[in-house]
Amino acid sequence: MKELNTDILVVGGGPAGLSAAAEAAGIGANVLIAEGDLHLGGQLVKQSHKFFGSKDEFAGTRGFEIARLLRDEIARCGDRVKTMLNTTITGYYPDENVVTAMIGEEEYIRVRPKKMVVASGAQERLIPFPNNDIPGVYGAGAVQTLMNVYGVVPGKKVLMIGAGNIGLIVSYQLMQAGVEVTAILEAMPRIGGYWVHAAKVRRLGVPILLRHSIGRALGDNFVTGALINELDEKFNPTGSPEHVECDTICLAVGLTPSNELLWQAGCKMKYVPFLCGHVPLRDKNMRTSNAGVWMAGDVCGIEEASAAMIEGRIAGMSAAASLGFKVSDDNFEKYRLRLKNLRAGEVGEKIRIGVSDVTVDGWEANS
Amino acid sequence: MDLISSHPVLNFEHRAKVSFCFDGKEMEGFEGEPIAMALHANGVKIYRYTPERKRPRGFFCAIGKCSSCFMVVDGVPNVRTCVTPLKRGMKVETQSGRGAIKLFPGEGA
Ligand SMILES: Cc1cc2nc3c(=O)[nH]c(=O)nc-3n(C[C@H](O)[C@H](O)[C@H](O)COP(=O)(O)OP(=O)(O)OC[C@H]3O[C@@H](n4cnc5c(N)ncnc54)[C@H](O)[C@@H]3O)c2cc1C
């Protein structure tokens, strides 16, 4: 089996991974980015809307354009950063410090990194209802990939489940692509996403049905409709179900960290509801309890691209510094301050509580 | 192919259009783009049937994580079609059950 060596292996080429790679290479480390998909940029490549956040983190710029800026930054690193696309990291063997990578579907290689930054992002949640496995029930990210990355019409009539930011944004994007959105269902008594996103879809006449959920997908071979229900205070269906015509049911019911490698690496983990799943404990430099492993982005708690990029920069610098490359403390302070500002205020409260729950002062056995 | 004809924000750049074979039928798709996208654009929604209850499965996560879009591609089963690039002349088949792996070169699937 072919074997590769590198100073730092970055798992995942989304905003977190690309920022980590750029930063580590910027101070001299050799970096290998393994990305399972066919392009760099992660979730950003499918975001056609202008981002919120702070100016430092490209607020006001469209997601796919931020991805391009990060790819340009990687290109400027020259030979220091090698990228392997369609290459999925499938396993980590802590005893030998060996990582296995699958290129395409059939070729396997071994990677021996001195240090590793895990930036594998998140995956979508599924909710239980009869027939939720038939074709036509798609994750919101998948619908975005079809229409925003490859220009394929995802369906004719879409029923959206979830009125958080993702459900609202994807509904709007569907209409931009010329697709009808029948309704947006939300189990909670209020809209979870930002008001501006909700206002945009309401203006286009899409009903947002609060206290409603899907009871069943209809169809034998693929979706031909859905039964929806109003919910009572205990979230139980009430009244008789209503029939909705649709050929696509889009689930925007949240994400959960893709943390498999961090489990394999033996990182100390904790279930934190505000971060949407099991996440590793970390020090202020994004290092896990495994002294050779750092993390950044959605994999350590579902948040935003803006935070993912800063975490990536901190993780990349810290991993490179552990190999002896020089970083000034000011740089760490600068990024930590940016992260703090990003999480300030009411919208950042849950993240602040979640992150403080898993942040440790330092790792005794490390360094 | 069912493609988005005009978009207020995005421009879609595609590589060459190539033909491939799905369950014996000739179809067209864009080279280098995931097989699943080409199938979807051609109106194909069922990609496999589950081993036990023979339930139809199709596209779902599109990031190579969920196993829903496994198909037999050029004789290889369990190919994640959402992250496998389309090539000219590929033979794509609906997968039934777990698929059979060729243990030795030349062995039938
Ligand atoms: C509809 C929508 C709207 C959003 N709007 C905003 C917004 O306005 N502002 C904002 O800041 N954020 C927004 N976000 C969130 C933002 O996109 C994510 O928080 C961000 O992309 C997380 O970055 P990441 O690098 O951690 O993960 P990702 O972007 O998910 O990247 C992870 C990468 O890792 C790869 N990968 C995973 N596992 C492996 C493996 N084992 N081997 C190799 N590669 C692997 C994946 O293929 C992927 O490319 C939005 C998200 C969505 C879905």
Image (cartoon, coloured by chain):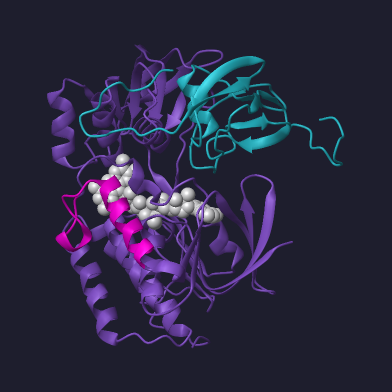
Chain colours: A purple, B cyan
Looking at this view, is A263 or B33 the one in front?
B33
Residue A324: name its quadrant: bottom left
Q: Quadrant of residue A186?
A: top left
Q: Does the magenta stretch include residue A56?
A: yes
Q: Where is residue A101 in the image (x, y as percent from the top left)?
A: 62, 57
> In which quadrant will I find the N terminus of chain A?
bottom right
Q: What residue lies at 62% left-to-right and 21% top-to-bottom? A: B21
Quadrant in the rendering for residue A147:
top left
Q: Viewed as shown, does residue B5 lie left or right of B73? A: left
A149, above or below B40, in the image? below
Picture layout, residue B22 above or below residue A28: above
Q: Give yes or no for residue A44 being in the magenta stretch.
A: no
How many numbered marks have been drawn onto this rendered protein structure? 0
**What residue occupies the far front of the structure in this picture?**
B16
Q: Residue at x 19, y 51 (%)?
A: A52
Would you say the magenta stretch is mainly helix, strand or loop?
helix
Q: Position of residue A44 (x, y in %)?
A: 33, 48
Asked whether residue A276 appears in the rendered view, the answer is no
Question: Where residue A182 sits: x, y (%)?
Answer: 29, 18
In front of the other: A185 or A105: A105
Q: Is residue A221 above or below residue B101?
A: above
Position of residue B73 measured from the top left corner of the image (x, y, whole percent): 67, 31
Residue closer to the observer: B71 or A342: B71
Which contiguous range is marked in magenta?
A: A52-76
Q: Can residue A87 be seen in this view?
A: yes
At horizontal 54% and vertical 37% (from top left) the residue drawn is B85
Q: In this view, does A69 lie to the left or right of A362?
A: left
